[in-house]
């Protein structure tokens, strides 16, 4: 149940991003649900490999290169999902940052209350 709730929270976060950034476009709720699923798969399968391959650059940049990796993951998901588009790579980096902030805030608010803790 928690996995489905996290997936829905991520889809809602994707739906909120176009209101904050006009260079990211999500056309429908079904596109947001599919994009959240593709983002989860990219973050599970591809992102760890990228983190290992770019570890020296990440260490030299004091961890800031992870923003680029997150933006690439966001951009890559937009390439595979019809109805989800990002205008440029810089927009993908900003969209990934907003996506993580919004989904973190929503999951903290909703999943904390769902667990019964306060």
Image (tube, grey):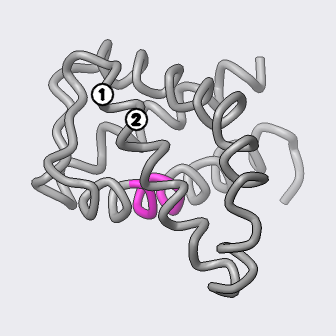
Give the residue at x 50% y 22%: 38
Magenta segment's dominant SS is helix
Magenta-drawn stretch contains 78: no
Q: Nearer the viewer, residue 65 or 57?
A: 57
Horizontal and vertical percent for residue 22? Answer: 10, 54
Judge from the rendering whether residue 96 lies leftward or rightward of residue 41; answer left or right.
Answer: left
Label 2: few (<14), some or many (≥20) within 10 Å?
some
Give the residue at x 87% y 44%: 116
- Dot 2 corresponds to which residue? 76
Give the residue at x 64% y 47%: 107
Location of residue 82 by image quarter = top left
Horizontal and vertical percent for residue 12? Answer: 41, 36
The total number of labels drawn is 2
Q: Nearer the viewer, residue 46 or 113?
A: 46
Label 1: few (<14), some or many (≥20) within 10 Å?
some
> In what element is the residue under mark 1?
helix
Query: Is mark 2 in CB contact (under 8 Å) with mark 1?
Result: yes
Q: Which quarter of the rendering shows the N terminus? A: top right
Give the residue at x 21% y 60%: 20
Q: Relative to 106, say whether 76 is above or below.
A: above
Horizontal and vertical percent for residue 44? Answer: 71, 31
What is the distance, in whole Å, between disc 2 and disc 1 at their CAs? 5 Å
Judge from the rendering whether residue 38 lies leftward or rightward of residue 4; answer left or right.
Answer: left
Judge from the rendering whether residue 41 lies leftward or rightward of residue 98; answer left or right.
Answer: right
Report the magenta residues as a range.
96-102
Q: Nearer the viewer, residue 79 or 36?
A: 79
- Dot 1 corresponds to which residue? 79
> In what element is the residue under mark 2?
helix
Q: Which quarter of the rendering shows the C terminus? A: bottom right
Location of residue 15 by image quarter = top left
Q: Name the disc covering residue 59, or none.
A: none
């Amino acid at each position: 149940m928690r996995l489905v709730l996290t997936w829905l929270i991520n889809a809602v976060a994707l739906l909120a991003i176009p209101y904050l950034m006009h260079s990211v476009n999500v056309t429908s709720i079904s596109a947001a649900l599919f994009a959240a699923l593709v983002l989860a798969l990219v973050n599970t399968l591809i992102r760890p490999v990228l983190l290992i391959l770019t570890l020296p650059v990440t260490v030299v940049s004091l961890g800031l290169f992870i923003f680029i990796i997150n933006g690439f993951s966001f951009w890559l998901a937009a390439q595979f999902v019809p109805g989800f588009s990002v205008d440029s790579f810089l927009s993908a980096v900003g969209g990934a940052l907003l996506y993580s902030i919004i989904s973190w805030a929503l999951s903290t608010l909703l999943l904390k209350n769902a667990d019964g803790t306060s």
